[in-house]
Amino acid sequence: MTTELNQAELERYARHLSLEEIGDAGQRKLKEARVLIVGIGALGSPVSLYLAAAGVGTIGLADHDHVRLSNLQRQIAHSTAGVGRPKVEEAARALFALNPEATIETEPTRVDERNAMSLLAKYDVIVDGTDSFMARYLLSDAAYLLQRPLVHGSIFRIEGQVTVFSPGRGCYRCLYPEPPPPGAIEASPDVGVFAALPGVIGTIQATETLKLITGSGEPLINRVLLHDAMAMTFREVRYRRNPVCPLCGDHPRIHTLVDYEAFVGARSVR
Amino acid sequence: MNAERHHRQRILPQVGEAGQGRLRQASILVVGLGALGSPVALYLAAAGVGRLGLLDDQRIELSNLNRQVLYQTGDLGRRKVEVARERLLALDPSLLVDAMAETFRPATAARRLQDYDVVVDGTDAFETKFLLNDAAILTATPLIHGAALQWGGQVITVLPGGPCLRCLFHEPPDPEAVPSCEQAGILGAVTGVVGSVQAEEAIKVVLGAGEPLRGRILQHDGLRGENRTIAFPRDPDCPVCSAQPRIRDLSRYAEQVSARGHVMA
């Protein structure tokens, strides 16, 4: 690798350079890395802030939404003055101000089965900061078909989870073969969220992303970390690639992206 | 106060209208506005805590920015508490902020804590962490202790009456025995995990909800992706939180206690 760190970078990343798992070589890998974060809300806020701070060279931000006042109870990349503006633009400005060394790419559109493959293909690691089952299946399928690692995170009220889907070692469909039945899960705006919970889940996603890029430690592959903020517990559940998974199993039936609205929504009609 | 801003939190059964009101009435002191203090202050402000005290004597340096997400490159050289206040008010203009650009020291420690309902430890030196612990027990102020180094960290919630930090660790470690974060390094995202857990704990203590880490230590290992909580008992001979404490005031601390000798976050 040829990317040299300049004097300002040596000072900015001094605390990383002292870590034996990162050091100069790891910091240069971070600088060369391209990470896509889909969803710049509760999870995407801490993920993007900590990846920009860490020196990830190129960060893609994908979100079609605008900042709302009710987001600010947990979405720390945004501010009151930004209400009504596109989330990707607001976050890009905050990240650039934190670290002008980072290149921020914005995608102010909803990621769907039509654009996901071309968008995800441009990045090395994908981070899921979305809040719908549709998007989770879509990102997991697309990341597997492109052979990209996906750092999954989700939150629900006072609980959250993180896992890493490494291509060939299990996917979202291995964990959840079927979307939840209709009515089992309320629509997002009607579900409460404990303010600091996405901070815990999002910063663990950021840690996992940095581990994947630098090849450090033991990523949460084949393990789901479950966090309960009220009980203050962390549990780990192990899972394996499902041999009959329609996506990554031994005899896959899914070779291209499908209609995710139909896949998730079909269950609500029955 | 705006009903829409905290709607998603108010509809949680653990919070509700009453809980959101308690948060608005609450005051929380954050001592140290660095790697831990950044996520703590951001999430407490976002959650709707009414008044935040920010205490730190430092200015922003370039080597802070790999982990201290309250600050930006254009802020270099400015006082942390001033920049933090601006950033938190941009998030929620109705927040009340007391910015104290001063050293946390034995002479004023108890007085500072008495002005707040809860105190959160965002400091980076063991001696200061023990000073905070002792001051919290002596003033009966709930303390959310946190520390981080390299890829790991810990959180303990010390409620009035203990158990406390001294039940577990007795005395601060020999400064020579602990590497500083300057020497040993630290991953920014790990401080984000520890600080966010501290914010969760502080909010729970204000709400009186859930089970705080009282008599439990949470140990986070980001490199292995492992988290453990270990219960620890009250030490019946604890020098500060037992029935017959030997530490009854903070006079045992030398005035220079918070000089940066052995750094942790």
Image (cartoon, rainbow, N blue to C red):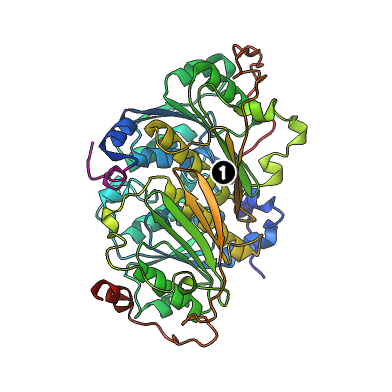
Q: Quadrant of residue A131?
A: bottom left
Q: Say which quadrant the C terminus of chain B sits in.
A: top right
Is disc 1 placed on a helix, strand or loop? helix
Q: Where residue B256 appears, x then y in whole percent?
A: 65, 20
> Does residue B259 show up?
no
Residue that label 1 marks: B64
Q: Which portion, as a residue range, is magenta?
A: B1-13
Which amino acid type is shown beneath numbered disc 1? Asn
Image-based side of A234 in relation to B172, left or right: left
Whether B81 is drawn above or below B228: the answer is above
Whether A3 is drawn above or below B262: the answer is below
> Does residue B263 show up?
yes
Q: What secondary structure prevails in the magenta region?
A: loop
Q: Where residue B66 appears, x then y in whole percent?
A: 56, 49
Identify the residue at image location x=51%, y=80%: A248
Whether B202 is drawn above or below A100: the answer is above
Identify the residue at image location x=72%, y=30%: B173
Q: Is residue B11 magenta?
A: yes
Identify the residue at image location x=53%, y=36%: B213
Give the crowd class for mark 1: few <14, some 14-19, many >=20 residues within 10 Å: many
Image-based side of B132 in relation to A178, left or right: right
Q: Quadrant of residue A266?
A: bottom left
